[in-house]
Image (cartoon, grey):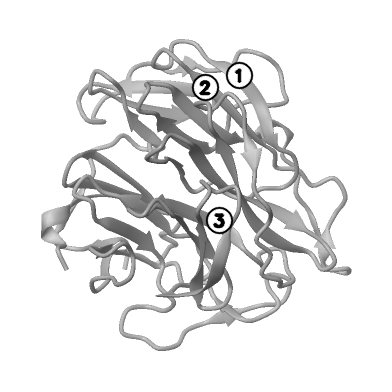
């Protein structure tokens, strides 16, 4: 089948290998981070400058895959996984990670549009999966969701890190522990958005056929009122974004292929319960009422291969970059008003 794209989705004119994160700088140009380097573009991503190294020292803490934010005060904050010390292994006999697993989270910040970088620090020691997004709240605190490995039995938990000073220092929340047992079980890879009533809403990846919701009233330092959401999903992370129009958009892999009510499921060392890992379709949906309800989901891309771990970026109001493994599309919000 190859890659199928919705007729209202245009191919995004980005060079191969550019999948985010992206921010808009003060002069209107774009910046991306690729590994330990930044690049900028003055033509909406068509061409990019030569890479500019962020950190020139030795490990640990060399920038790797991460999330990027430019605050209203103009500081650029990067939170990232330290791949230079990454270590992972799983013992099938005991159903637990091997000793010494590691996937630390670090942060670094720039006060001058990426020319110089300061305050490099480890903000989570342990094992974290993928970082999905980082937001600046209306009143200023920065929040990023992270996951941690729990034991007895081995599973993942979800929490958040919060900065009140533009990424100079960080506080941490308690752990959301939903149980489970497996190297891909528990609460994982949450995506965060601020609601208009100033609560934070996190959608958490699970193996129970839907995202779980958690809410915070203190900028992510604690999470309450969590439970199953009404959004069915496979075992794959989603991505929430507040658009310039005020609406919310969600990109994710639905529970099964469009029109189907069943599909392959797996468990074993992955998870205690059987879960759908349907990732061959990527869908988006919009909400006009702060996530209480959603318009009909639209499949924007379909493939024989996985189209997962979506990334969303709105470089200009009403135009949305939708990127995922194996897919890069340009969506006009007005074409998907449902």
Q: Badge 1 local density, few (<14 within 10 Å), some, or many (20+)?
A: some
Residue at 40%, 88% (x, y): give it.
Answer: 261
Where residue 262 sits: x, y (%)? 45, 88
According to the image, label 1 marks what residue?
119
**Who is closer to the viewer here, 221 or 118?**
221
Task: For the N terminus, give its image quadrant.
Answer: bottom left
Residue at 57%, 33% (x, y): give it.
Answer: 64
User: Which of the marked residues, 2 or 3, is nearer the chain's N terminus?
Assistant: 2
**Residue furthest to the bottom:** 261
On the picture, is 172 further left or further right than 202? Answer: right
Q: Badge 3 local density, few (<14 within 10 Å), some, or many (20+)?
A: many
Q: Specify whether residue 102 is in view.
A: yes
On the picture, is 17 further left or further right than 122? Answer: left
Q: Is residue 12 above or below residue 178?
A: above
Task: For the C terminus, give its image quadrant.
Answer: bottom left
Which is in the foreground here, disc 2 or disc 3? Answer: 2
Quarter occupied by residue 267 = bottom right
According to the image, label 3 marks what residue?
189
User: Which of the marked residues, 1 or 3, is nearer the chain's N terminus?
Assistant: 1
The kind of secondary structure element at disc 1 is strand
**Residue furthest to the left:** 334
According to the image, label 2 marks what residue?
109
Q: CA distance from mark 2 to mark 3?
A: 23 Å
The kind of secondary structure element at disc 3 is strand
Q: Is residue 141 above or below residue 133?
A: above
Q: CA distance from mark 1 to mark 3?
A: 25 Å
Q: CA distance from mark 1 to mark 2?
A: 6 Å
Where residue 285 sits: x, y (%)? 28, 65
The kind of secondary structure element at disc 2 is strand
Q: CB under 8 Å between callouts 1 and 2?
A: yes
């Amino acid at each position: 089948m190859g890659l199928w794209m919705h007729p209202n989705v245009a191919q995004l004119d980005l060079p191969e290998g550019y999948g985010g994160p992206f921010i808009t700088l003060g002069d209107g140009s774009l910046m991306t981070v690729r590994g330990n380097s930044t690049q900028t573009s003055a033509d909406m991503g068509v061409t990019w400058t030569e890479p500019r190294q962020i950190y020139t020292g030795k490990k640990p803490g060399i920038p790797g895959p991460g999330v990027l934010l430019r605050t209203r005060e103009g500081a650029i904050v990067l939170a990232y996984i330290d791949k230079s010390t990454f270590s992972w292994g799983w013992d099938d006999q005991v159903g637990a990670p091997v000793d010494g697993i590691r996937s630390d989270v670090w942060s670094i910040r720039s006060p001058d549009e990426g020319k110089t970088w300061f305050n490099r620090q480890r903000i989570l020691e342990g094992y974290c999966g993928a970082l999905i997004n980082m937001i600046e709240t209306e009143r200023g605190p920065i929040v990023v969701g992270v996951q941690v490995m729990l034991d007895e039995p081995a599973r993942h938990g979800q929490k958040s890190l919060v900065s009140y000073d533009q990424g100079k220092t960080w506080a941490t929340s308690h752990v959301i522990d939903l149980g489970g047992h497996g190297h891909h079980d528990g609460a994982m890879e949450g995506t965060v958005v601020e609601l208009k009533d100033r609560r934070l809403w996190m959608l958490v990846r699970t193996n129970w056929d839907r995202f779980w919701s958690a809410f915070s009233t203190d900028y992510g330092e604690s999470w309450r009122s969590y439970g199953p959401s009404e959004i069915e999903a496979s075992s794959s992370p989603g991505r929430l974004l507040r658009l310039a129009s005020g609406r919310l958009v969600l990109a994710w892999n639905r529970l099964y292929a469009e029109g189907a009510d069943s599909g392959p499921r797996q468990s074993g060392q992955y998870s205690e319960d059987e879960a759908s890992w349907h990732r061959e379709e990527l869908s988006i949906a919009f909400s006009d009422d702060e996530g209480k309800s959603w318009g009909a989901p639209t499949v924007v891309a379909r493939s024989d291969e996985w189209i997962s771990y979506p990334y969303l970026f709105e470089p200009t109001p009403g135009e949305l970059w939708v990127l995922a493994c194996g897919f890069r599309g340009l969506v006009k919000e007005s074409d998907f008003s449902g």
